[in-house]
């Protein structure tokens, strides 16, 4: 039996702000029976009440950080066959949001120390600690440099879900939480501490979430100033594509939908019901284009903003669901106000509404500047919405341009990060919808039957874990 402990700052359905949560909710349960994969996350006060009732206390102990002892509760529950652990401290995790606080560095240094200090209390000895993104990046560093005596054989894997967020803090802001007397070169980043850099050097294996993103990370355009480190550690970096949990995202059974459906039968009913719900004209002959996204620069929103009026000149309906940068929230809200029959903007994070939109849409727009993997385009396809994407990262690995002759391909795409290239692709998609209904049906079917099952990716992770254990 191989024991793997996944450490992360979110895991669906307990906590989710984006694709990271989806991954941690799905990957651990996709391994074969000879892997005992467990997950540890913070015990946020935002965990839904129904799930909280299942979570039971296991231990409590004290965590040394700097010159202070902090209370730490350790809790646990079983969910869909996976053991979850939770790190509790109300001062750090009883907050309305997961992130975005002045003391995030301290909060997640505490989490990392608490995870390492909790290990001797578990009836589970991890062979591999699999860390995810900057919030967990102190673990490989601390394990290598401060906890090695306690865990001499434990291997660490670090997955980059997004290199944009690295956990960079002034030396005097967090050095005391890491118990550093000086700034070691493995952590040093332009005079500051970079937690992700420390994890890259300390981990036994580095993975990222698509093969194309693994290549892109070596390029200064994508590497966010860590491209040199990635090039140096190239032999340890692999790209493994994410999947989606096809039991969670299942149009046949999804209780959030207006009408659960099979293949394309009744997809039209969902479109009609959503148009009614949102107050749009009820028209089955007009394509519905949607975006469900964090409203941040990464997602290509400046392209959309640039040509928004040209997009809305076409015969389509545009729905944007998202939260994020205030400037984008305001812009898309005000444009929608001026096009009440064509565009709806909903500034919210709403899981149930997102599924209604995926199910109702004909197209899903995702023109990302960079996209490590992207879960949303896969969910869209699962619900029969055709993706329109920029060819980057995981979007390039999961979406292929529909070829009218061979009838192969599951979406539309463009390569250059340019507003008019995107506009042209949207125009092509919309005219394709209007002019070639039979071919469009074939395209929808191709998208709908594209499988992004986790099993295959879990097997690839397992083969790398096995190599580490040799
Ligand atoms: P990222 O992790 O960069 O945000 P992904 O495409 O990998 O992007 O994953 C985004 C996930 O978050 C998807 O499951 C998507 O449906 C969900 N999501 C994003 N914004 C919202 C929102 N406003 N409401 C509900 N779900 C959202």
Image (cartoon, helix red, strand yellow):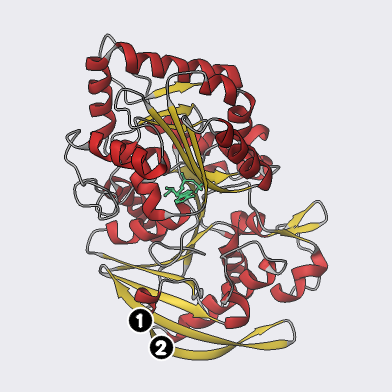
Task: Please name which of the two marks, 2 or 1, marks the residue nearer to the observer.
Answer: 1
Crowding near pointer 1: few (<14 within 10 Å), some, many (20+)? few
Question: Which residue shows up at 53% across the image and 30% down it?
Answer: 339
Sooner in the amino-acid sequence: mark 2 or mark 1: 1
Give the number of callouts: 2
Circle 2: element type: strand
Ligand 1 has an atom within 8 Å of the beta carbon of the residue at disc 1: no
For residue 37, say whether it is visible: yes
Residue 405, given in percent of the width and then of the height, sits at 27, 8
Quarter of the image with the C terminus is: bottom left
Q: Kindly give the residue lying farthest to the top in the view shown.
A: 405
- Residues at marks 2 and 1, CA–CA distance in whole angstroms: 14 Å
Question: Which residue shows up at 32% across the image and 38% down it?
Answer: 360
Q: Mark 2 = which residue?
A: 58
Q: Mark 1 = which residue?
A: 53
For residue 422, say whether it is visible: no
- Residue 357 vertical position relative to residue 98 in the rendered view, above or below: above
Give residue 52's quadrant in the image.
bottom left
Crowding near pointer 2: few (<14 within 10 Å), some, many (20+)? some
Q: Nearer the viewer, residue 36 or 305?
A: 305
- Residue 120 vertical position relative to residue 204 in the rendered view, above or below: below
Residue 116, given in percent of the width and then of the height, sits at 53, 77
Question: Which residue shows up at 40% across the image and 54% down it?
Answer: 351
Q: For this view, does 146 lie left or right of residue 241?
A: right
Q: Nearer the viewer, residue 53 or 221?
A: 53
Q: Nearer the viewer, residue 256 or 48?
A: 256
Residue 323, given in percent of the width and then of the height, sits at 56, 50
Q: Which mark is residue 344?
A: none
Q: For this view, does 18 lie left or right of residue 175?
A: left
Residue 216, given in percent of the width and then of the height, sits at 56, 34
Question: Which residue shows up at 17% across the image and 34% down it?
Answer: 265
């Amino acid at each position: 039996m191989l024991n793997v402990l996944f450490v992360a700052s979110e895991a669906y359905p307990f906590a989710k702000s984006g694709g990271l949560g989806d991954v941690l909710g799905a990957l651990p349960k996709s391994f074969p029976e000879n892997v005992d994969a467990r997950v540890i996350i913070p015990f946020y006060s935002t965990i839904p009440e129904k799930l909280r009732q299942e979570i039971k206390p296991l231990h409590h102990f004290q965590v040394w950080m700097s010159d202070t002892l902090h209370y730490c509760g350790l809790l646990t529950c079983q969910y869909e066959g996976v053991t979850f652990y939770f790190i509790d401290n109300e001062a750090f995790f009883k907050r309305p949001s997961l992130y975005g606080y002045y003391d995030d560095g301290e909060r997640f240094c505490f989490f990392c120390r608490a995870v390492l200090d909790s290990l001797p209390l578990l009836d589970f000895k991890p062979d591999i600690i699999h860390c995810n993104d900057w919030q967990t990046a102190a673990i490989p560093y601390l394990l290598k440099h401060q906890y090695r005596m306690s865990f001499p054989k434990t291997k660490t894997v670090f997955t980059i879900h997004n290199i944009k967020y690295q956990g960079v803090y002034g030396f005097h802001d967090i050095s005391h939480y890491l118990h550093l007397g000086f700034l070691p070169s493995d952590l040093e980043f332009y005079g500051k501490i970079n937690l992700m850099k420390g994890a890259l050097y300390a981990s036994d294996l580095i993975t990222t979430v698509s093969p194309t993103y693994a290549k892109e990370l070596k390029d200064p355009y994508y590497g966010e100033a860590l491209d040199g480190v990635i090039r140096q550690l190239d032999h340890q970096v692999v790209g493994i594509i994410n999947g989606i949990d096809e039991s969670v995202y299942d149009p046949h059974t999804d209780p959030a939908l207006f009408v659960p459906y099979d293949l394309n039968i009744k997809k039209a009913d969902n479109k009609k019901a959503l148009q009614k719900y949102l107050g749009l004209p009820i028209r089955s002959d007009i394509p519905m284009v949607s975006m469900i996204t964090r409203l941040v620069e990464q997602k290509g929103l400046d392209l959309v903003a640039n040509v928004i009026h040209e997009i809305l000149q076409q015969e389509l309906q545009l729905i944007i669901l998202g939260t994020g940068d205030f400037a984008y929230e305001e812009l898309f809200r005000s444009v929608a106000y001026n096009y009440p029959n064509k565009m709806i903007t909903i500034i919210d994070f709403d899981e149930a509404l997102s599924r209604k939109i995926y199910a109702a849409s004909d197209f899903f727009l995702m023109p990302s500047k960079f996209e490590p993997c992207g879960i949303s385009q896969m969910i869209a396809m699962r619900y029969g919405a055709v993706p329109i994407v920029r060819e980057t990262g995981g979007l390039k690995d999961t979406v292929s341009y529909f070829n009218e002759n061979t009838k192969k391909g599951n979406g539309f795409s463009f390569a250059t990060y340019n507003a008019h290239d995107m506009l042209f692709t949207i125009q092509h998609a919309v005219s394709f919808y209007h002019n070639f209904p039979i071919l469009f049906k074939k395209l929808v079917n191709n998208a709908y039957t594209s499988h992004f099952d986790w099993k295959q990716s879990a097997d690839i992770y397992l083969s790398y874990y096995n190599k580490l254990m040799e």
